[in-house]
């Protein structure tokens, strides 16, 4: 299932089970849009952070059982509800994207790994969650791949 963006790979490949593809696309669209807020365009940091605050507020609404209608939150809400996706992982992503706005250099590798634990690891964990894989060893392995 191609998603329009400058990346050159299909997000929800035909290798993924058809039943999971809408959720994979919803996760991707949320993460891609939020990351673009942090990284793309010429908006000032305060505007970027305000937009990320809006994403946090939409996650809070989803947590309360609401279904925000604006993209990408409607499909994300459906995916969260259908697959019991942990919202904490989406909050972790937003934390990393806020860091993208505020920090451009890392003092050492441990700082970079901390960032990766919030910017990359949540995606791997969300995908494992979709596949109903939640044992600690495989989560650790996914983190090692993503970081």
Image (spheres, rainbow, N blue to C red):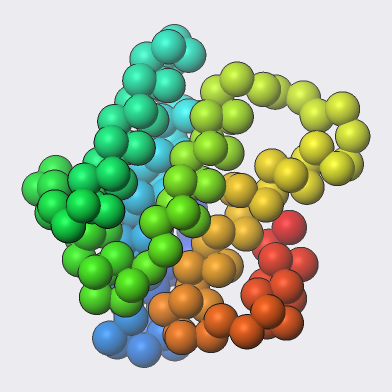
- Image quarter where the N terminus lies is bottom left
Q: Position of residue 66 (x, y in %)?
A: 13, 52
Image quarter of residue 23: bottom left
Q: Is residue 44 above or below residue 64?
A: above
Residue at the farthest left position:
69
Residue at the farthest front position:
64
* Tally of numbered discs: 0
Viewer-proximal residue among 142 and 18: 142
Q: Is residue 17 above or below residue 33?
A: below
Q: Is residue 134 above or below residue 97?
A: below
Q: Is residue 139 left or right of residue 114?
A: left
Q: Position of residue 132 (x, y in %)?
A: 46, 86
Viewer-proximal residue among 41 and 140: 140
Q: Is residue 12 left or right of residue 72?
A: right
- Can residue 4 be seen here? The reply is no
Viewer-proximal residue among 9 and 99: 99
Image quarter of residue 47: top left
- Image quarter where the C terminus lies is bottom right
Residue in view at x 80 percent, y 29 percent: 106
- Can residue 14 be seen here? The reply is yes
Q: Position of residue 70 (x, y in %)?
A: 14, 44
Q: Position of residue 36 (x, y in %)?
A: 43, 35
Residue in view at x 86 percent, y 42 percent: 110
Residue in view at x 36 percent, y 42 percent: 33
Residue in view at x 87 percent, y 27 percent: 107
Q: Is residue 23 left or right of residue 41?
A: left
């Amino acid at each position: 299932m191609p998603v329009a963006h400058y990346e050159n790979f299909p997000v929800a490949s035909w290798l993924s089970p058809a039943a999971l593809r809408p959720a994979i696309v919803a996760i991707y669209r949320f993460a891609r849009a939020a990351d673009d807020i942090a990284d793309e365009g010429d908006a000032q940091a305060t505007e970027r952070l305000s937009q990320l605050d809006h994403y946090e507020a939409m996650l809070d609404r989803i947590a309360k059982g609401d279904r925000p209608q604006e993209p990408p939150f409607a499909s994300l809400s459906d995916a969260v509800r259908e697959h019991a996706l942990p919202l904490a992982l989406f909050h972790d992503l937003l934390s990393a994207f806020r860091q993208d706005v505020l920090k451009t250099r890392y003092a050492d590798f441990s700082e970079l790994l901390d960032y990766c634990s919030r910017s990359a690891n949540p995606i791997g964990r969300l995908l494992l969650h979709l596949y109903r894989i939640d044992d600690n060893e495989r989560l650790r392995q996914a983190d090692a791949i993503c970081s």
